[in-house]
Image (tube, grey):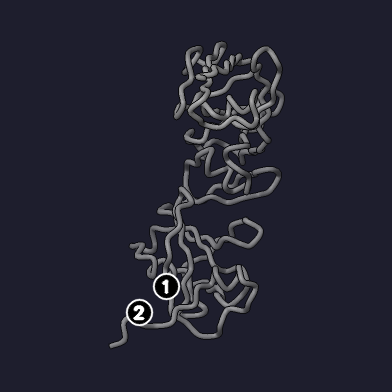
């Protein structure tokens, strides 16, 4: 009996990335992800599998308790019913998302309609769906007639609320002060060396000098203190940093 690891498996994702056509015969390797957008490789023999076949190949049972989506090349999700088929030889058909759920939810992210198979979705996942850098972008719930609500990376938003929710991403731009001078940062956390480089762009670790970093007017988690090498602080608009160079020589 031929073992699967002895068979030449066509990696559909690699074929798409290389810009070549997916071969006509299996087996094929695709990626199946979960509600956290964590993907794992799955091998499927049939070039035109049904939704049930994809779920079975991923070891998700009972298959009737799951919703399956195909991740399109433009990032949108397209549902696949249990008996419906998809052709793995078509360009871009290399990723799927599976949810243990009996209900899908419609949301909008940066104006694009998106379906989601779970009741809850995290801020980090919303950023992934929007295809933005999660470190340099925020995501907000759009509140008509009110102030938009920031959704943190670990916040879980309940999509079961009435109506389809609208979310928007925005590049982070926070003004802080370093040695009294205004600086714009594009992330919500800064490391010791991030702060040092705001004042001394060419600074590097060395035996002849070290930098003392203090801060004040920070967020509730870290309102003030000393920042040491290897540490990270959360950033707030108007936060004040002081960076002092000390010559050890």
Q: Residues within 10 Å of mark 1 (few under 14, many from 20)?
A: some
Residue 118 relative to residue 166: left or right = left
Per the image, label 2 sits on a secondary structure element best described as: helix
Q: Residue 239 appears in which quarter of the rendering?
A: top right
Q: Residue 43 carries which label?
A: 1
- Estimate the x, y position of residue 113 in percent, counting from the top left: 66, 49
| Residue displayed at 43% across by 82% down | 8
Residue matched to label 2:
4
Residue 194 can be seen, yes or no: yes
Residue 113 relative to residue 47: left or right = right
Looking at the picture, does residue 17 appear above or below residue 136? Answer: below
- Estimate the x, y position of residue 13 in percent, counting from the top left: 54, 68
Residue 227 relative to residue 165: left or right = left
Q: Earlier in the sequence, mark 2 or mark 1?
A: 2
Q: Residue 215 appears in which quarter of the rendering?
A: top right
- Estimate the x, y position of residue 107 in percent, counting from the top left: 61, 44
Q: Are the residues at dot 2 and dot 1 in contact (C-beta closer than 8 Å)? A: yes
Q: Which of 233 and 221 is in front in this view?
A: 233
Per the image, label 1 sits on a secondary structure element best described as: strand
- Estimate the x, y position of residue 21 in percent, counting from the top left: 62, 79
Looking at the picture, does residue 15 appear above or below residue 95? Answer: below
Q: Quadrant of the N terminus?
A: bottom left
| Residue displayed at 50% across by 39% down | 122
| Residue displayed at 55% across by 28% down | 190
């Amino acid at each position: 009996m031929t073992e699967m690891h002895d068979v030449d498996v066509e990696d559909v994702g690699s074929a798409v990335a290389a810009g070549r056509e997916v071969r006509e015969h299996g087996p094929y390797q695709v990626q199946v992800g979960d509600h956290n957008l964590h993907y794992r490789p799955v091998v499927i023999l049939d070039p035109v599998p049904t939704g049930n076949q994809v779920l079975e190949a991923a070891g998700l049972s009972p298959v009737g308790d799951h919703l399956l989506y195909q991740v399109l090349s433009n990032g949108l999700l397209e549902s696949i019913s249990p008996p419906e088929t998809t052709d793995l030889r078509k360009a871009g058909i290399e990723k799927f998302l599976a949810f243990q759920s009996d209900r899908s939810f419609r949301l909008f992210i940066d104006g694009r309609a998106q379906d989601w198979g779970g009741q809850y979705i995290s801020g980090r996942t919303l950023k992934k769906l929007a295809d933005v850098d999660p470190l340099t972008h925020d995501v907000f719930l759009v509140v008509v007639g009110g102030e938009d609500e920031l959704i943190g990376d670990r916040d879980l938003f309940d999509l079961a609320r009435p109506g389809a929710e609208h979310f928007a991403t925005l590049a982070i731009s926070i003004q802080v002060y370093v040695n009294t001078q205004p600086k714009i940062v594009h992330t919500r956390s800064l490391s010791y060396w991030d702060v040092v480089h705001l004042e001394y762009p060419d600074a590097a670790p060395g035996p002849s000098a070290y930098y003392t970093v203090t801060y004040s007017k920070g967020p509730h988690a870290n309102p003030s203190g000393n920042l040491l090498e290897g540490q990270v602080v959360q950033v707030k608009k108007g936060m004040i940093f002081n960076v002092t160079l000390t010559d050890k020589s």
